[in-house]
Amino acid sequence: MGGSQIWLDTTETLTVDEMLKAICVNSANDCVVAMAEYIAGSEEAFVQMMNDKAYELGMSDTTFKNCHGLDEDGHVTSSYDIAVMSRELLTKYPEITNYTTIWMDTLRDGETRTF
């Protein structure tokens, strides 16, 4: 997988709340891919959804090549487009701050992690 992850096991079951916590706090790329596959059926289909939404929002400097943001040829954006995307997220889903303001919490039966 590469990058940050929580070593998600294919036999493991986490709630959406736990997955979002791992994604937002720990940048868990394995959880990002698992959520993408759950939502769209495949990472590729989810990336297409991401690009479609970027287009809809007018993010003309952005092309997504993967769902986790790790470096890949052609995977580009601009600070302006990140601001557009962030405004959309915070305006339509303000509950995201329930996850993005966490600095220490538990996951997996009380395992304490400092993120």
Image (tube, helix red, strand yellow):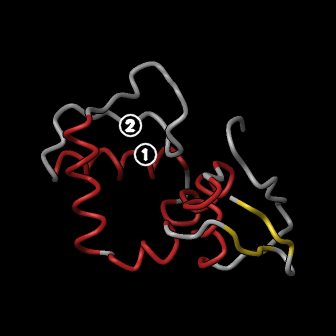
The x, y position of residue 80, in whole percent, is 19, 39
Q: Quadrant of residue 74?
A: top left
**Residue 26 or residue 30, whichever sits in front:** 26
Element at label 1: helix
Kind of residue at disc 1:
Val
**Residue 67 or residue 17, whichever sits in front:** 17
- x 49%, y 39%: residue: 69
Q: Is residue 14 above or below residue 67?
A: below
Q: Quadrant of residue 61?
A: top left
Which residue is denoted by mark 2 in the rendering?
64
**Residue 76 or residue 56, whichever sits in front:** 76
8 to the left or right of 38: right
Disc 2: CA contacts within 10 A as few (<14), some (14-19) or many (>=20): many
Mark before the other along the chain sequence, 2 or 1: 1
Q: Is residue 44 above or below residue 60?
A: below
The x, y position of residue 5, in whole percent, is 72, 49
Q: Which image quarter is the C terminus in?
A: bottom right
The x, y position of residue 85, in whole percent, is 26, 53
Q: Is residue 58 above or below residue 31?
A: above
Q: Is residue 108 above or below residue 49?
A: below
Which residue is denoted by mark 1 in the rendering?
47
Q: Which image quarter is the N terminus in?
A: top right
Disc 1: CA contacts within 10 A as few (<14), some (14-19) or many (>=20): some
Depth check, mark 2 against mark 1: the one in front is: 2
Element at label 2: loop
- x 74%, y 62%: residue: 114
Q: Residue furthest top?
A: 73
**Is the C-beta separation of discs 2 and 1 under 8 Å?**
yes
64 to the left or right of 59: right
Kind of residue at disc 2:
Phe
